[in-house]
Image (tube, rainbow, N blue to C red):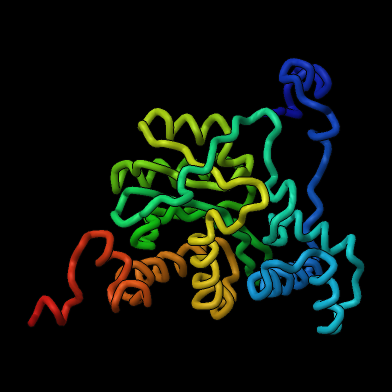
Amino acid sequence: MIDKDDKLTIKQQCALLDLCRSGVYYQAVPISEKDLELMRQIDKIHLKWPFYGSRKIRDELWDQGYDLGRDRVRRLMRLMGVEALYAKPNLSKTHPKHKKYPYLLRGLSITRPNHVWATDITYIPMAKGFCYLIAIIDWSSRMVLSWKLSNTLDTAFCVEALEEAIAKYGCPEIFNTDQGSQFTSKEFTATLIENGIAISMDGKGRWRDNVIVERLWRSVKYEDIYLKAYGSIIEVKKGLTKYFTFYNQQRWHHNFDKRTPAMVYFNTKPQRQVAA
């Protein structure tokens, strides 16, 4: 956007675009190998004990031989988008100007595909860096309808995942998210409203309201991410393409009497039952 070879000075270009000059001159500092390793360990601790806050995670890291303070743990947790899952104020990083919607799933019996979809974002460690994963899941069948990766916590990749799911599978009656700024943004909610989808959002401090996606993250990380140690976002994309195909079409779910999410979503029987 800013052209340093243009006839206009950097100051003039920034004034025209209403940008701060400090942002133009700033050069991002790469994350150190030590911090990347700490982030990987924090992610594992958080997945094992999701109710641990920065103090307990620091204590666990101390026990593993890492010498660091709580402030550093908190800084890395913020970078990862990780917070303790327990009842407390400001659980999600909300945007003060974004509209919040009520939680619509309390007491609701969800028994059919496309009744309720849900989504969330999680941190994905790599050998040299990290990225973020969003997945959209059908609540009743647990089928992953779409997913996207991004190296930033922006709104664009969330909207892309939503639009892809709608294009492939139609529209749900209700879409449930937390109150994160990506999901309360005008771009994301407008896509839902334009398609006639009712918006449901978890209450503050009620992480259990969207626990179905938290369970998916546990499966993804223990069954794929931690086992593979992907080196780049391209490798993560290739690996997760295979994993989500396996998850949807081959992995039996204990809640569905040895049926896969795809079988439940499309209402098909296990192969051996069909053969019989």
Q: Which residue: 72% across, 20% down? A: 17
- Residue 150 screen position, x and y as percent: 57, 52
Residue 151 image point, x, y percent = 62, 52
- State left or right for residue 166 relative to residue 51: left
Residue 135 image point, x, y percent: 47, 55
Quadrant, the N terminus: top right
Q: Which one is nearer the viewer's eye here, 118 or 12?
A: 118
Q: Quadrant of residue 26?
A: top right
Q: Residue furthest left?
A: 276
Give the residue drawn at x 54%, y 71%.
218
Q: Nearer the viewer, residue 272 or 124?
A: 272
Question: Which residue lies at the image location 83% right of the left edge and 21% below the top edge?
Answer: 11
Image quarter where the C terminus lies is bottom left
Image quadrant assignment for residue 19: top right
Q: Looking at the image, how many numbered discs can be counted on the residues?
A: 0
Res. 140 image quadrant: bottom left
Residue 72 image position (x, y, % from top left): 87, 62
Residue at 78% from the left image edge and 22% from the top image edge: 14
Measured along the vertical axis of the image, is residue 182 above or below residue 212?
above
Foreground pick, 87 / 93? 87
The single residue placed furthest to the front in the displayed view is 107
